Image: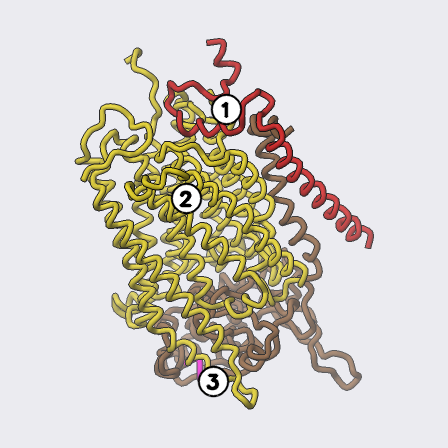
Amino acid sequence: MFSVEFQAYGYVAATIFLTVALYSYIYHLYKNRRDADGHDYEEYSNMALHDGIEDTPVNSLPKDDKK
Amino acid sequence: MENRPLEYDYTVAKMFMLTTIIFGIVGMSIGVILAFELAFPGINTILGSGLAEYTNFSRLRPLHTDSVIFGFTISGVFATWYYVGQRVLKVSMAESSLLMFLGKLQFWIYILTVAAAVVSLFLGETTSKEYAEFEWPVDIAIVVVWVLWGVNMFGLIGLRREKSLYISVWYYIATFLGIAMLYLFNNMEVPTWLATSAAGETHIGDWFHSVSMYAGTNDALVQWWYGHNAVAFGFTVPIVAMVYYFLPKESGQAIYSYKLSLLSFWGLMFVYLWAGGHHLLFSTVPDWVQTMGSIFSIVLILPSWGSAINMLLTMKGEWQQVAASPLIKFMILGSTFYMFSTLEGPIQAIKSVNAIAHFTDWIVGHVHDGVLGWVGFMIMAGLYHMAPRVFKREIYSKSLMASQFWIQTLGVVLYFTSMWIAGITQGMMWRAHDQFGNLAYSFIDTVTVLHPYYAIRGVGGLLYLIGFVMFTYNIYKTMTAGKRLDSEPASASPMGA
Amino acid sequence: MFHWLEKNPFFFAVGVFAAIAFAGLVEIVPNFAEASRPVIGTAPYSTLELAGRQVYIKNSCNACHSQLIRPFKSETDRYGHYSLSGEYAYDRPFLWGSKRTGPDLHRVGNYRTTDWHENHMKDPAAIVPGSIMPKYTWMYTKMVDIDTAFAEQLTDAQFFAVPYNKPVPMKELDVDGKPKTKIVKMGKSIAEANAMALVEAKDIVKNMKDQDIKDAVNKRGEIPEIVALIAYLNSLK
């Protein structure tokens, strides 16, 4: 049946896509170590450690800069 | 007033802390009663035969599971979200009166929903589907509560000062989405009042009765897709969210590897949903679904252990804190139990093991080492950490907390060891044949042999409940009699003797 | 790309949803039509049986009893032929259970009688020494809700095309070698449904000993829960 076959190919393609995506994500994280804003990923742990309302955000939103 | 510095507002968090504790006591007490009913059946009629219908094992069982899931755990998830969410996003609930209103509204609708659920389950109004027993009017109320939570969550995220979302927020978002999808699809049902007879009457019989939209094998498949993943998105994902916040914060240690936490997240999201088929091995669902369930359950060890190891390694070089603080003990033992049950589960999902384990008490043991050792410990640890910051007082007693830890740990150990032995004994006896190829045991032989293990399990559960009452007392005294704090502690929670 | 995802809550949520929805689509959808096809010999539940099924659900019998016989020798020896997917075609909801504190019941109608159930439900430990099953005494005094069972039948027929009042094929063959058929009837009105259930109930109580139950059905035209439950259990074959 056409639709079943179509489904099967669709699933295989989607599985491969998601696997590739996951592995490239791993590669991306460990290769670059820093995200596009120039923050080392490990800095983000500080979001929990310095979480007072007056603490400086690790990565401020632009709207805050205007204040 | 105008010059008062902006502070986090924990009003809603406090409300849900209260329900976490109340529903915890209710759900665990019912659990202990159930455990002893299996060991000593006379307890089924403890309030006399007139009320036997309401004290009976089968009527109480859904009340136990649903009150610990939708009462204790979900309250704990809400309570911690309304605490952690504000802090890692660096935005206060006080900044938006709308979100504040919605948070309170969510709480009160939640309370009404729970009341309706309790009454309907006592009366036996159930759809029979595990952890989805409620009839459609209650289902709709649950959806409303959930949507309000989602609006609040995304509302708070919209107001945030921190551009990146902390890993805990990822897990909270996943909890919201996962449960929403699962709950909706599994509870598809047609209310009977939509049907009309040839004679034209409507509203025949109970107005709240409904018929499942799926039949037989399909219904089973959808239910266990739900049942398994409700555990995923109710008992794993939000609890990981908690540990990723509370452990680093309480210990003052940065997460061992933030990158590993991101990877484990996506791994868990993708893999978890496939594993539901392991509840249906050797059933009438297609073989390939069963095999898929089995394989993915094994694969699931990786992302689960990714998070758990990340937690344990966060304490690297700081193990003296584990010895010194009972609060960190809860979290570290919780993470260890998480590793333990995420290894045990995949083992049970291997087909040849499942042939023995399925339908036995080993499964019950597996669930409970996860929920008592991991979910319960983490939620209590979270509340303990929150208490000094929410109430601005020192935790009332450290020694009480330490005793509670050891009593509950002993309870969990008694629980799962007795259930292992019971389950494997029963599984082996069911399949034993004598030398002539006849069944070696009648069914009742496999029941009476379990009596000592059922009794030990009851004691284990009782110890855990006693520990939970100590926890309640400690929190209550913290609120009312703990030493006042001038400033918020940066990491380790201050505790009185 | 990933970095962008982490800072855009909306697209992040979409990504998470795609990752978690994928498995459900693959596992559940393809088999849907096939699994719901009934095997030959499976008929819909009669009004009284369905009412009994509701009693079964109301008391969470499925918390302790499975209705799924796995394909192992030890199980087929104990409970009978292993379960087939199509046998559950009219089970809404399914009642496979997840725990066997008591034995499987999928084919209990083959080896237990009305009389046995009547005594057993009253005091299980008296019939099976050592049994930890509670007594279900209230089922002998409470009356079953036939109206709701009828409403469920109507829903089944209207929304799920369950073949009430239509011939369904049975396993036995007639003289021409064709499968015999069976028609499960459903009432046209509440009154008729109740009358039909009462006829069924009278048939069950013939084999019961409890005089109160017999009087309730034969003299007063009321149906205690236990009668409906036994009708349901007897139908499990």
Say whether residue C103 is left or right of residue B470: right
Closer to the chain start, of discs 2 and 1, is 2
Q: Which mark is residue B74?
A: 2
Q: Label 3: how many residues lie within 10 Å, few (<14), some (14-19) or many (20+)?
A: few
Residue B254: give x, y in percent of width and height.
43, 32
Q: How many marks?
A: 3
Separation of residues labelled 1 and 3 (CA atoms): 70 Å
Separation of residues labelled 2 and 1 (CA atoms): 23 Å
Chain ID for yellow: B
Q: Secondary structure at mark 1?
A: helix
Instruction: Chain C: give its colour.
Output: brown
Q: Assess whether residue B288 is covered by the magenta stretch.
A: no
Pick the front one: B462 or B303: B303
Say whether residue B390 is left or right of residue A23: left
Looking at the magenta stretch, what is its main secondary structure?
Answer: helix
Amino acid on which disc 2 is placed: Ile
Separation of residues labelled 2 and 3 (CA atoms): 51 Å
Q: Which residues are drawn in magenta?
A: C114-118
| Image quarter of residue C220 | bottom left
At horizontal 33% and vertical 31% (from top left) the residue drawn is B491
Task: Work out whether residue B82 can be spotted.
Answer: no
Q: Label 2: how many residues lie within 10 Å, few (<14), some (14-19) or many (20+)?
A: many
Residue underneath mark 3: C206
Residue underneath mark 1: B158
Amino acid on which disc 3 is placed: Lys
Q: Assess whether residue C117 is covered by the magenta stretch.
A: yes
Instruction: Chain A: give its colour.
Output: red
